Image (tube, coloured by chain):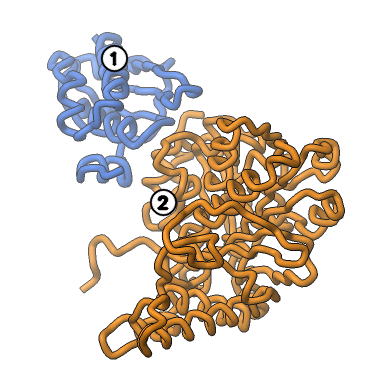
Amino acid sequence: MKSPNPLPIYFDYMASTPVDPRVLKKMMHYLGPDGIFANPASATHIYGQLAAKAVEQARVQLAETISAEPSEIVFTSGATEADNLAILGAARFYQHKGKHLITMLTEHKAVLDSFQQLEREGFEVSYLKPKLDGLLDLQMLAEQLRPETILVSIMHVNNEIGVVQDIAAIGELLRNKGIIFHVDAAQSAGKIAINLKKLPVDLMAFSAHKNYGPKGIGALYVRQKPRIRLQPQTFGGGHEGGLRSGTLAPHQIIGMAEAFAIAEASRSLEEARVLRLRQRLWESIKELPGIQLNGHPSQRVAGNLNVSFFGIEADSLLLALRGLAVSRTSACASASQQPSYVLKALGLSDELAYSSIRLSIGRFTSEEQISAASEIICHQIKRLREISPL
Amino acid sequence: MNYNKLVERCFFQPEHVGVLDSSQAGVCHSRTGDASRGDYFDLYLCCEKSGLILKACFKAYGCPYLIAGLEWICGQLEGSSISEHPRIDYKALVQLLDMPRRYYPVALLVEKAYCDVVKGGK
């Protein structure tokens, strides 16, 4: 019998992804009494030694996917903690060199809130406004650089509008200026090639659960040559080279590494498929009256569509599209009931920002789900327009 | 946001969306709200000389409670006598639609439009 209220189709892969069954299977070996469950820091017995070995193997596996050295990986509880450690840790360590920092208005809250904390500590922060397409104006960045600038933080892929910043060009601009370059790569890892042997990036934050791994685990890449120093933000045991104290979680770490390895192995094919699905969805809805695509049309990650519906009230839009699990803003900001600050930075009015949704497509999205989404969006938007007197 | 069954039915299957020609005899019209504030709507009714309301309809830009409230009001008006109205106030709408407190102004707007259009019909 057909359920009267079937679950909506999942279109929120940029908020979180399901754990890939292959990842889940591997993680299970590191949890139960017959598995490798021990504390990796328990060096006095075989249980702990096996756990430590598994963690180090995972570190190697993860590092390979981004062309980094294993010793450059610091495991954290997620990208938020990695961003916090990078920004707070670098700024506090290098503050004797200067107290000026640069970021963008459209960064994730994990980055913006870290900078706000630093402002309270006496640092000065320049917040760069994006161009109307969401991309950074390199010239604007160049003009903001000062002798006392010590850190620039620009995200790789924006979590709301999916635009891809040219981090190679930004890094080149900052090279040999003594400025640390931090990149939040929570939304790009596994979707865009990341080669830290070539990219001029000093610190890069990663998340597992945006990449078909488990929640509660992330990592920070910390460049060793030239060595980037950070002031630790957590204390209690000196794990992870003293940068992040706390018992390591082997099942989470193994899950993250496996997820990243799977993503890297299938990246080209998967992104081509996801891009084709996104293009199909956009082609089917782009002629709807009052619809607008937010963010650069092509310099964006394959799975992201962020669209506004002019003249459609926000709550009615969300109810009308209840057959689709979508976001109105980023999951990390959705509790605020405020219009998206990312869309507002692009110049959208409060009203239009509220009447916007993010559809994000991923590994398990099917052709049938795209067809169903297209039908729901077209039918419901036309219906709301017929009801509207505007 | 969770909505009750009545809101969902009125929102997804409205039967009173439309426009009436206000220049015709017996047709009354009320325009209420402010689009920039998120609520803007027209409410129409067409009355016979006897007072029988032949048709009630609306057009609305606003939240689901606004659309559902107008749809329900139109259902109450249509087929009744204008002399029976006004008999509905915002409190009844709030209760019927299970409206959270922050949406009470929407119920007040619907009540105002309803009273205005009924007054015009008399």
- State left or right for residue B77 relative to residue A378: left
Total numbered labels placed on residues in the image: 2
Dot 1 alpha-carbon crowd within 10 angstroms: few under 14, some 14 to 19, many 20 or more: some
Question: Does A94 sit above or below residue A189?
Answer: above
For the residues bearing labels 1 and 2, Cβ distance under 8 angstroms: no
Residue depicted at x 22% and y 23% = B53
**Residue B76, horizontal then vertical, whole percent:** 19, 29
The residue to which callout 2 is attached is: A321
Residue B112, disc? 1
Q: Secondary structure at mark 2?
A: loop
Q: Is residue A185 visible?
A: yes
Residue depicted at x 45% and y 54% = A326
**Residue A297, horizontal then vertical, whole percent:** 71, 54
Mark pair 1, 2: CA separation: 30 Å
Q: Chain of mark 1?
A: B
The residue nearer to you, when weighing B24 against B1, is: B1
Q: Quadrant of residue A32?
A: bottom left
Q: Which chain is orange?
A: A
Which quadrant does the N terminus of chain A fall into?
bottom left
Question: Does B82 sit above or below residue A180?
Answer: above
Residue depicted at x 42% and y 75% = A41
- State left or right for residue A123 relative to residue A333: right
The colour applied to the residues of chain B in this rendering is blue
**Residue A170, horizontal then vertical, whole percent:** 80, 53
Question: Does A23 sit above or below residue A103?
Answer: below
**Residue A135, horizontal then vertical, whole percent:** 73, 47
Q: Amino acid at mark 1?
A: Lys
Q: Are marks 1 and 2 on the same chain?
A: no
Q: Is residue A128 visible?
A: no
Q: Amino acid at mark 2?
A: Leu
Residue A92, disc? none
